[in-house]
Amino acid sequence: MTEEEELQLWKKFKKTADLECRNKLILYHAPLVKFIAGRMAMNMPPNVEYDDLVGYGTLGLMDAVEKFDITRGIKFKTYANQRIQGAILDELRASDWIPRSVRKKARDVERNIQGLEAKLGRPPSDEEISKSLGMSFEEYAELLSEISGTSMLSLNTVWYIGKDDDEITVGDQVEDAEHVTPDLHIEREEAKSILKDIIMKLPDREKQVVYLYYYEELTLKEIGDVLNVTESRVSQIHTQCMLRLRSKLAKDKDLFGNL
């Protein structure tokens, strides 16, 4: 399907709500669901099935097709990417797929990182974190692998509370909202700026992983090839990065990392 053919299909669907057009759009973009599910599966424990992720993501794609506004001038892939990922994460959260013991370990590491950063005035190194936890580096790396599934953010997670108690979620950063007040728009931009500043203060290796994974959309294996480390090590770096971000977001009373 050419871009022009897709555009015409979108116009017809949005004008007539034709079911056949809707189904064609869903089928055309179905590979995006498999791609996202495949990337996310790499950070999930063995009890999470890839086919289940695809099923959850398909629901997100269907929702994205229904709600996409072709007049906003953004690419559908950009919009759908977050909807698909959010649908997968929301279903996983609803099914309580992470054991409480694993959640507790993740929270313990977050608190440890937060305490070390306050003490040192900078992001602590891997070795400093592992030492503070009373572990060898190898034991800490194994712990990161165990809690890797907790590092995924949900679109419904409230992580910023504005001056007038307006709740801003991760999904709001890309959501195609119909009614956004000027004040809320400003607060969303402030929230983006805060998150960007936090990311820029991450250790270089973690910033590289964030950029390659979330912006270049490389797989963990591809990132490993770029950084000359194993895929499992990339997963550990990604997990530690997300734990750092959540500890930062939880540090201020107006920022929350309540996963």
Image (spheres, rainbow, N blue to C red):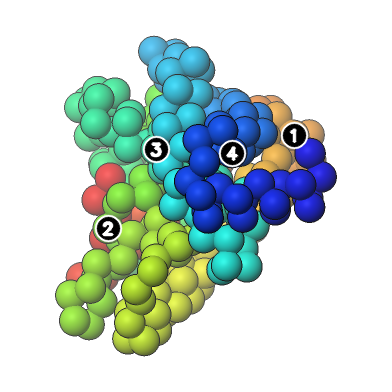
Gap between marks 1 and 2 measured at Cα: 31 Å
Which of pointers 3 and 2 indicates the residue nearer the eye? 3
Amino acid type, mark 1: Glu
Amino acid type, mark 2: Val
Local SS, label 4: helix
Residue 118 x, y percent position in the rendering: 33, 66
Give left or right: position of 94 versus 87.
left
Residue 34 x, y percent position in the rendering: 60, 27
Per the image, the residue denoted by label 2 is 158
User: 23 or 51: nearer the eye?
Assistant: 23
Gap between marks 3 and 2 measured at Cα: 16 Å
Amino acid type, mark 4: Cys
User: Does the CB distance between marks 3 and 1 fall below 8 Å?
Assistant: no
| Label 3: how many Cα within 10 Å (few below 14, some 14–19, many 20+) | many
User: Does the CB distance between marks 4 and 1 fall below 8 Å?
Assistant: no
Q: Is residue 41 visible?
A: yes
Which of pointers 4 and 2 indicates the residue nearer the eye? 4
Q: Residue at x 70, y 29 (%)?
A: 221
Local SS, label 3: helix
Per the image, the residue denoted by label 4 is 21
Residue 112 is marked as: none
Per the image, the residue denoted by label 1 is 222
Residue 87 is marked as: 3
Gap between marks 4 and 1 measured at Cα: 35 Å
Q: Earlier in the sequence, mark 3 or mark 2?
A: 3
User: Does the CB distance between marks 1 and 2 fall below 8 Å?
Assistant: no
Q: Residue at x 32, y 37 (%)?
A: 90
Amino acid type, mark 3: Ala
